[in-house]
Amino acid sequence: MKMTTIKMKRMLEERMDHDGWITSFNRDKDTFRVEWKDSGQGITITLPNVVSKWEERGESAVDELEEHIKEALRIMNETHELKGKERNIFPVIRAASFPTETNGGKRLVYSDHTAETRVYYALDLGKSYQLIDEEMMDKEGWTIERLREVAGFNVRSLSVDMKKDEVYGNTFYFLSKQDGYDASRVLNEALLEEMKAEAEGELAVSIPHQDVLIFADVKNPAGYDILAQMAMKFFAEGRTPVTSLSFLYEDKKLEPIFILAQKKPKENGKGE
């Protein structure tokens, strides 16, 4: 069966049949929205993206989407407190273009990170998490300093086991625990310093999407090209993309590097 955005819209309407929700379709933008009747809070889905995933993975892709939508809507309709949940607060990395307000107009709490990225803060709820907004902070008298300290402590407690790969004389490390905080581990300064100390060449870092963090011990020019290709591939495939650019880690800072992968490296590790 050839899947179209109209067929996908109908499929989602059937799955999102709920007394408390309303659905709508924007034909011009090819988007489908589900929201709570009372509050207007909800989620907008780009249908061509869903169709593409359906063509790759079939019904399971829509099953996964349905689960994410329902979980997100459930969270939107609940009130959460920070008190007593300090161990469940983590930082999350997002693109610098990520919204600073919720659809309901609440201002999200965030910190500057790089020119390409920001740090937001999340209350972990098990299967998902809720980004912390200023209203939640004000209710309980939390300061941004306390939030940073708690989130920073928690991210340092996460596992940092990585897969290692050698490509054309360069060493790449992949961290992907699929716990929602893979990219967040870039905020673990002890980890960055350890990787820097062990690197034989330049230490480069990529944060293409939420569920992966890549370190590269770059020992020759080909390493930059390979990292650029990897970062772009992961960025395109990620459910929550962050940035396709990579960074050099120097003097405890991440500086963006602009890499033009003009030619694939030859077997000797050099370009043509």
Image: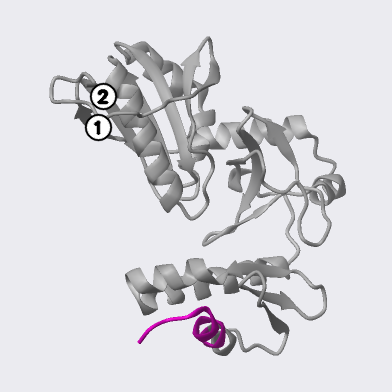
- Mark number, residue 164: 1
Q: Amino acid at mark 1?
A: Lys
- Looking at marks 2 and 1 on the same chain, the residue that comes earlier in the sequence is marked by 1
Report, in whole angstroms, how far the alpha carbon at label 2 lies from the one at label 1.
7 Å
As helix, strand or loop, the secondary structure at mark 2 comes to strand
The C terminus lies in which quarter of the figure?
Answer: top left
Q: Amino acid at mark 2?
A: Thr
Classify 10 Å Cα crowding around label 1: few (below 14), some (14-19), many (20 and above): few
Residue for badge 2 = 171
Q: Residue furthest left?
A: 267
Q: Residue at x 38, y 46 (%)?
A: 177
Instruction: Nearest to the eye among marks 2 and 1: give it.
Output: 2
In x, y percent, where is residue 217? Answer: 32, 20
Looking at this view, is 170 or 131 the one in front? 170
The verdict on residue 105 being magenta is no
The N terminus lies in which quarter of the figure?
Answer: bottom left
Looking at this view, is 23 or 48 the one in front? 48
Looking at this view, is 89 or 134 the one in front? 134
In x, y percent, where is residue 162? Answer: 31, 35
The verdict on residue 5 being magenta is yes
The magenta span reads 1-11
Q: Are marks 2 and 1 in contact (CB under 8 Å)?
A: yes
Q: Residue at x 58, y 71 (%)?
A: 69
Q: Residue at x 33, y 36 (%)?
A: 174
Q: Tell me if residue 267 comes above or below residue 16 in the rendering.
A: above
Would you say 206 lies left or right of 220 here? right
Color scheme of the displayed model: one colour
Q: Main structural element of the magenta stretch: helix, strand or loop? A: helix
Q: Residue at x 20, y 28 (%)?
A: 166
